[in-house]
Image (cartoon, grey):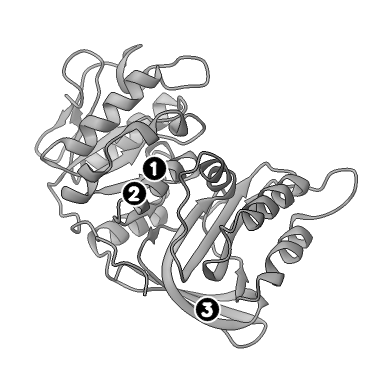
Amino acid sequence: MPPRVILPPALRPGDTVAVIAPSSPFERVLAWVGIGWLAQRYRVLFDTGGGPPLAGDSRGGGAPSLSAPSSRGLFARTGYLAGSDARRRDELVHALSHPDVRAIFAARGGYGANRFVHRLDWTTLAKQPRWIVGFSDITALHVEAARAGVASLHGAHVAALGRGDARARAALLRALEDPAGERHFGGLTALRAGAAEGPLFGGNLALLHACAAAGRLRVPDGCVLLLEDVTERPYRIDRMLATLEVGGHLAQAAAVVLGDFEQCDPGPDGVTVGEVLRDRLLPLGVPVVAGLPIGHGLRNEPAILGGRARVLSPGPEAVVTLAGA
């Protein structure tokens, strides 16, 4: 039996949430719109760069009362990073330890979180559980949350919420405010038939590979392994899966569910990412399902990492059920 995972409390309207930028800079207008949408339902805090960390506020359920964007704080930009490692680390530390914060939303992924997340004391999260929300580079935070035994939410970033997709926004709220609820995804493609159930674990393949290289990846025994990626050539997908297998990181998986592999186009050799995924994953001898609408595609359904996942694929089609507990 895998160890029991702590499920953070469900969010409620009026709860306090933090917005952080632990990785790359982001499109400011989209971020402002996303923050404004969150502020209609929650009290939003973030690093304004002009005072104490997470000094922002929102009042009366209306537009957020926030200081103007600064070259410091959430809107900082240092090349391909959202400010220095120290700024991003301190911002995350404050979000993890702030007594009122119930969820931490990433403004964007990109790159940079794995430069510092290993230095944090993640026992704080286990003592005061709260949701970490994001995907892509935020997989580095999900890996650390899993090591601490706390569930987290693989889902849209704040900048993506700023695009105004009502369906995506509703799905995110449903996952956070009713995390125990089941969601069923049918009509998926069974690459290898079978049935399995276990805690959902994973995220972006490139980040999982990087976490393994850093010695931070700890794949739960009997998990349902979620994989997705973007703009990686098929041979690079092959390399990452092959080295994860050689390192023993795939042996614990009871099943593999594949999200989007967006813009992972063939090179001159013509080998497709689908061929690579079949070649590397089918020999594991566990159910493998493709087509889950999660990742960098048009749909990015929220999924609770550490929550229960059930895979049923008796034939060419499969159903995946996700829930928080």
Residue with the most extreme right position: 269
265 relative position to 156: left or right = right
Quarter-of-image position of residue 325: bottom left
State the separation of the CA atoms marked 2 and 1: 6 Å
Which quadrant does the N terminus fall into? Answer: bottom left
Residue at image location 21% in from the left, 12% down from the top: 50
Where is residue 138? Give x, y as percent.
Answer: 43, 41
* Residue 300 in view of the camera: no
The mark that comes first in sequence, 2 or 3, is: 2
Where is residue 125 shown, x and y percent of the image?
23, 46
Q: Secondary structure at mark 1?
A: helix
The Cα–Cα distance between marks 1 and 3, rounded to whole angstroms, is 28 Å
Q: Amino acid at mark 3?
A: Val
* Separation of residues labelled 2 and 3 (CA atoms): 27 Å
Local packing at callout 2 (Cα closer than 10 Å; few below 14, some 14-19, many 20+) is many
Tag nearer the camera, 2 or 3: 2
Residue 77 lies, with reference to residue 290, above or below; the image says above
Q: Which residue is rendered at x = 50% and y = 79% of the image? A: 196
Which residue lies under the disc numbered 3? 319
Other-residue count near label 1 (Cα within 10 Å), few / some / many at <14 / 14–19 / ≥20: many
| Residue 145, disc | 2
Residue 190 seen: yes
* Rendered residue at 9%/38% (across/down): 60
Residue highlighted by disc 1: 141
Element on which disc 3 rests:
strand
| Helix, strand or loop status at disc 2 | helix
Q: Residue at x 43, y 16 (%)?
A: 77
Q: Is residue 100 left or right of residue 303?
A: left
Circle 2/circle 1 CB separation < 8 Å? yes
x, y (%) of residue 250?
A: 58, 62
Q: Position of residue 266 (x, y in %)?
A: 81, 48
Q: Nearer the viewer, residue 35 or 246?
A: 246
